[in-house]
Amino acid sequence: MLVFSIVATIIAFIGVVVEFRRDLMMLQQNSYRNDRYNRWLGQSQDTTSTMRLVSGAAVLASLGTLSVPLVSVNLVAIVSIVNIFILLDRKYKKPLVMTKRARRLLGVMVFLALAVVGGSMAMALAGLFAVTYIPAVALGVFCFSHLFVLAANWLLQPVEKHINRGFYKDAERILASMPDLRVIGVTGSYGKTSTKHYLNRILSEHFDVMMTPGSFNTTMGVIRTVREYLKPYNEVFIVEMGAKQPGDIKEICDLVHPSVGIVTAVGEQHLESFKTIENVQRTKFELIDSLPADGLAVINDDFPFVANRKVDGVECVRYAVSNPGNASYTGSEITYTPQGTEFTLTGPDGERHKFATRLVGECNVSNLIAAIIVALYLKVPVDKIRYAVGQIEQVEHRLNMKRTPGGVTIIDDAFNSNPTGSKMALDVLAMMRPGKRIVVTPGMIELGERQEELNREFGRKIAVSADVAIIVGQYNRDAITEGIGSVEGGVAKVHTVDTFKDAQALLGGMLGKGDTVLYENDLPDTFK
């Protein structure tokens, strides 16, 4: 019986480690923050998943007074094997990235689990309970794996702070060694990543430029960029600045000391953590408040909570497309062509410059204007700016348009949907003719108390912009479908599916030449 118990324990512990990796992936997607991880647990109900309930029942059956030792040991082994196969067969949109921090966390989690299982072995050898209970203890660790993730993350906090402080000091040293480096900060509820890319492409015509790659928009992401990518010969450093809570952007500014700051938008994004749009405004403008007296603030007046924010102590240039009242730079005469978009930029002295770009959507015109303003401020010749604007490629998953060999147009707006961006994407979809206009979406997230309201409004917009709506998952399904159904005369026919795989299968049976599909948002694995 001892041999059977050891084998079953090993199998159960393998299942524990595989589950630990999944739990760690979710912690990583929640920025290694226990509060956000706990919030996800509450929303996802992962603590009462079928796998955990079945495993818990197996544990109780194995520890019961009427259990047969050989049967209970085999039961634990069988349940553990099934769990392992289910977990290994799962596919994730954003799989675990095994960074050094992730390895440290996994190591501590495994150590804690070994301590629990090892303790049960010691108790069994001391005769305090049967050796056949040891596999059940290991399966019990599987049932409560979340506690091990939270405990490991809490225990490692002092270690992580010490390590991060060393990285911060090293980044400070590197930046101090480059006194002539121009640092440009870019932030906003949305549009900051696209604006960063457009600015990088334009300024690269005249300067040696480095930008934070991907979504490296946290303090640690910026530190990593400085330490691993920034070179002594770079002349301009474009820093994307994201925030999950007040103070995040100021922390980045205190490190890089930007002289130019762009605020692309202040909107109802991340209200779940910020609670109010006033808090969002205050946090985004930490960039502007950090600028030196001889710096430049470039802010987008198309958003009320940007336009109503007074800026003192630094030169401030306002730009707009739809709300030009107090703007120094305005975009107008926007026309869409098969090649992209043409628009006119009017400056503070009335000078007009025409631009043509492969990009589509008013939001992209707005983002381009911000980049052009900074380029003009840095004295990049207009002909170089015009050439770069014409060469800019669409940023992946941000209103990216392409055509398939079968004649179907795909509009990929799958990254980080928000109320303003989704409206603009649907405006582009509404103009696509003559085929069917199809939107595939799970809706918008992290909107706090306004989640349901804003997704219902999103549904109303879909009703008049699309011919077919495919609503993915259950997270926002009711709000969106209610919104679509509330519009009298709406044309969108609604389909509901559980996954994007199901949506693709449904699309396969309805798509034809000339049709257009808009993919609006793609929720990460932390939302279902």
Image (spheres, helix red, strand yellow):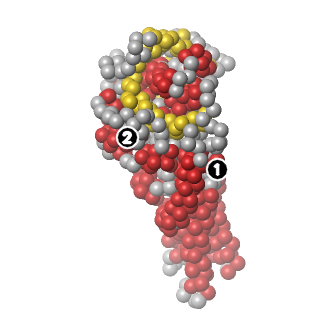
Residue 148, image x and y in percent? 52, 66
Q: Amino acid at mark 2?
A: Asp
Instruction: Give the residue pinned by disc 2.
Output: 289
Q: Residue at x 31, y 18 (%)?
A: 325
Instruction: In the displayed orientation, state which residue is furthest to the bottom.
Output: 126
Instruction: Give the residue pinned by disc 1.
Output: 89
Residue 333, image x and y in percent? 44, 10
Camera-nearest label, 1 or 2: 2
Q: Residue at x 32, y 28 (%)?
A: 307
Q: Is residue 285 left or right of residue 82?
A: left
Q: Amino acid at mark 1?
A: Asp
Q: Is residue 335 visible?
A: yes
Secondary element under disc 2, as helix, strand or loop, is helix
The label number, if any, that marks residue 163 in the structure image: none
Residue 351 against residue 258 in the figure, above or below: above
Residue 22, image x and y in percent? 57, 55
Residue 466, image x and y in percent? 45, 20
How crowded pointer 1 is (Cα within 10 Å; few <14, some 14-19, many 20+) is rated as few
Q: Counting residues from the N terminus, which is met first, the one under dot 1 or under dot 2?
A: 1
